[in-house]
Image (cartoon, grey):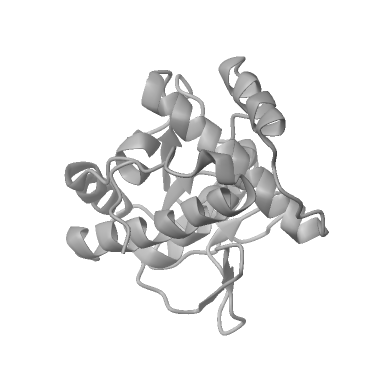
Amino acid sequence: MIDRNVIVYDSGAGGMFLGYSLAQSSSYIVTDTNEYLPDGTEEDNMFSVGDQQINHFNGLTTTHPYEVEDLKRTAKKLDLSFKLIAITLGDDELDMRCRFFLSLLFEIKHRIQTGVNFELTQDITDGFFRQVQGGERTFLSPLGSKWDATIKYKKLFADFDLDEITRLISLTEQNIKPERMRTLMQDYTIKNIEQVEKYAPHLKGYFMFEVKRK
C-alpha cells in the first residue's frame, strides 16, 4: 500500500480544492477569490519546501511541481512510499484556452490579494494570451516529466469527463462518488469563471467549457 498519493499541481489553480474535495474533508474555508484554505481545525495536506513531515488527508498530499524533489528527499528520510500524479496540459486549441484561463485567474487572485484589483483591459489580456502562446505562464506539471501517472487538466476542469474523474479518484485511492466530484468541480469552475469575467468583462462567455451555469 502506498503511504502518500501525491497530486502534483499548483494549489492556487485548484490543488487545495482537489485535496479537500477528493478526501471529503470539511476543514476548510473558501475566500472571496475562491481559494480553499485550512480553517485551523487540522493541518492541510500541502507539502512545501522545508517541511519535515508530509501532511495528508487519507493518504492524499498535494504539492507544486517545483517542490517535488524536496518531497522525494523528505519521503526517503521518513521511509514513506509515494506515487506522483501530475495534472498536465497539452497544446491543442482547448488546452491553450485552459492555459489562458489559468493565467488570468492567477493574475486576478494576485491583484486582489495585493490590493491591485483594477479591471483587466483587452490590451492586458491580449498580452497574457501572447505569453501563453509563447510557452510562458505555465503553472501545471509539464508533459514529459517522470510521473507515475498523469491526469489531463482539460478533461477535469473543461470537459468534466467522468472517466477521467473516476481515474483520478482511483489513482488517489479516495472514496468520493465520481458524480459528486464532478458536481463539485463544476461549481468550483463556475466561481472561477465568474472571477475572470468580473475583472475582464470583455471575455464574458469565452470560458464556458462544458459547465452549465445555474
The answer to whether one can see residue 59 in this image is yes
Point out the image quarter for the C terminus.
bottom left
Q: Is residue 159 left or right of residue 61?
A: left
Q: Is residue 78 left or right of residue 17?
A: right
Residue 80 point in image, percent of width and height: 48, 53
Work out whether 89 lies above or below 201: above
Question: Can you name the residue that lies furthest to the right here?
Answer: 115
The residue drawn where x is 57% and y is 85% is 41
The residue drawn where x is 56% and y is 40% is 202
Q: How many marks?
A: 0
Residue 131 point in image, percent of width and height: 65, 21
The residue drawn where x is 60% and y is 18% is 135
The answer to whether one can see residue 54 in this image is no
Work out whether 145 lies above or below 19: above
Residue 13 point in image, percent of width and height: 54, 48
In this view of the protein, which residue sits in the foreground, 86 or 178? Answer: 178
Question: Can you name the residue that lies furthest to the front here?
Answer: 202
Residue 61 point in image, percent of width and height: 48, 56
In this view of the protein, which residue sits in the foreground, 112 or 51? Answer: 112
The residue drawn where x is 43% and y is 32% is 88
